[in-house]
Amino acid sequence: MSDFFDVNLLKAVLRMATPLVFAAMGGLLSERSGVMNIGLEGMMLTGAFVAVLGTYYLHNPWAGLVCAMLAGAGVGLIHAFWSIGLRSDQIVTGTAINLLAAGITIFLCQRLWNQSGRSPKVDTLPNVTAGINVLVPVAFLLVPVVWYFLRTTKPGLRLMASGENPQAAESVGIAVDKLRYVAVMMSGVLAAAGGAYLSIGSLSLFTRDMTAGRGFIALAAVIFGNWMPIGTLGACLLFAGSQALQVQAQIKGLGISTDLLLALPYLLTLIALAGFVRNSRPPAGLGQHPTSH
Amino acid sequence: MFESARSRGLLVTVLTSLAAVAIALLVGAIFILLSQQNPITAYRALLDGAFGDRRAVGETLAASTPYIFGGLAFAVAYRAGLFNIGIEGQMLMGGLAAGLFAAWNFDLPKVVYIPTALLLAAIAGGIWGAIAGALKAVSGAHEVITTIMLNYLAYQVLSYCLLRADGWLPVNPQLQATDPAAQNARLPNILSGTRAHAGLLVGLLVAVLVWYFLFRTSFGYQLRTVGLSKGAAAYAGMSWGATITVAMFISGALGGLGGSSETLGLLGQQYNAPQGYGFASIAVGLVGRNNPFGVVLAALLFGTLRSGSTAMQNQAGTSKELVLVLQGLVILAFAALASSGRAQSWWARRRGARFKDTTDTIGVEPGVAPEL
């Protein structure tokens, strides 16, 4: 059993958690500001694609990463404009973003490289040590940064107030809508960075639907982590751990039910939501607007 | 006076849907243009591919069928103030249940085998939906999140059944599918020489039933009341928790039926692959204004786009994924139009509301479901 839990397993957990942590921190900012974001999946996918696109044309993966984050901000702006500016239903808008991202990435793949399923190979971001990409530590450093931002800084506290009670926040002079715009765009930036990790960090190309539901798992991590940065990190590690264990169990042929391990993140989130674990409490103002017209 | 206001409302409703589709097609055309292709050629190839000949028409009908079920599933939940994005998982569970039951090859006549298989699919999908409804009723868990989780759980259940349960289930792990459905369980073909199957007729029948249920039964009324106002429903003595649980059961059952219609009609077995209609069903429901008959029309539109997209790719070289883009654009356009409708009514109220305008019935958020 001792060679089952080896350093490779630990590295695998960190690798699998990285895209989740990026997207979940993004999701956390958006949800904490009061905007539901089920478009995380599409934002990640956009990031994964644009990272390759930027790297391909600018011949530099760092430039690709920047392009991805800018594109993420752009997608975030769409989500923000529709759900804050136009006051559309946030779920409706998020769904549209997921469909659009899935379609446009494949459409452009086909158009630019004449291959519908994948992009050509591009350079990747460097590794800091064997099997650990430079974005892995960045993701984990992001967690205390987000925690510090929300807990101690003025904009962070205002952002949380906007999410808890937008009407009250507005009445004490907080520009709720403006803060939410920034939060949702930041969530796009971070989700896109998570997507970029997949395409130019752990792989070196874009493949269709390569995020494969990670945006939704990240959202689940936010909820399972009870909308707290540290809790969300824990959820990401737990979800990544069950995935990594499943891979390890398959390689080493251990008699652990791999199906159950794969199903674990979803089951745990359902159980947490059902209130069996502890009280799950979303921001009270989630989906509400400061003024209703 | 009432009648004319009502018909004006209907007109606005229909026009909004048409405008959303038109805007989506227009933006899609710009998109094609930007990728240095000819949008007219592309759209013509699409139409040709959807209606060009008998086979194409059959393909369009077959492609529209799952959207009818998906759109109805979305509409029922939406009318109860719920946002069911778990239609994908409900379809999978329904398809799996029907696929397994059909693969067991019981010695049953068609008139018994097909309805029983459909019923089982409806129950399987219904249970999958009701879980989300019950969780919301008991602990307030947001149905959007629970249905997403249930989608992924459905994938896991499906792949477990198809890949590792061959000891006790009629499945083929090599093919990653259930064994082929018994001939007596297959939904018959309705247009010879094409893939159009009787699932379409089931879908149309179900649309009528859903309309009757929503607008002509007391439980349908209760469901819509709960959707419009939780408080008002409680005041009238209606149980919110029980109503949304049943609503999610019905919604899931419709999704399950849709899955089984694919399994027993189009494919002949359930494969280990996503149905891929879950999110599109939302667009169908919205464009169809969550009215059963509107949903049928919207489903035909989306079926046309889907069946024509392959021809568009082959003849005009425009990637068939444009259809996904169009679906996304329809939703965004729709949301924007609805929002301008709300802005208008707000403006009208401020102006003293000289005329009671009808545009504020274009609500997209659950809870303000418009009645046609």
Image: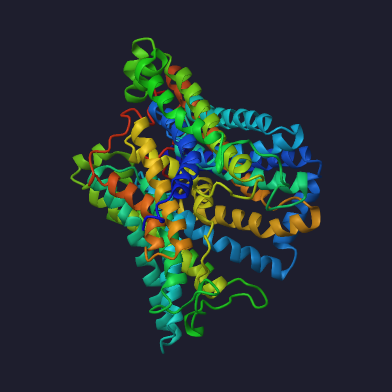
Tell me the residue at 71%/35% (across/down).
Answer: A55
* Image location (x, y in percent) of residue B105: 44, 85
In which image quadrant can residue A63 be found? Answer: top right
Tell me the residue at 44%/55% (across/down).
Answer: B87
- Residue at the front extreme, as displayed: A2
- A244 vs B17, left or right, is left
* Image location (x, y in percent) of residue A180: 46, 23
Tell me the residue at 43%/17% (across/down).
Answer: B350
- Residue at the top extreme, as displayed: A173
Whether residue B345 appears in this view of the structure is yes
Nearer to us in this view, A51 or B236: A51
Nearer to us in this view, B359 or B263: B263
Q: Is residue B277 above or below residue A30?
A: below
- B176 vs A174, left or right, is right
Nearer to us in this view, A155 or B263: A155
Quadrant of the image for the C terminus of chain A? top left
Nearer to us in this view, B284 or A62: A62
Whether residue B18 appears in this view of the structure is no
* Image location (x, y in percent) of residue B106: 41, 86
In which image quadrant can residue B195 be found? Answer: bottom right
* Image location (x, y in percent) of residue B294: 51, 52
Quadrant of the image for the N terminus of chain A? bottom left
- Residue at the bottom extreme, as displayed: B107
Q: So how many labels did they put on this image? A: 0
Visual colour scheme: rainbow
Q: Is residue A232 above or below residue A173?
A: below
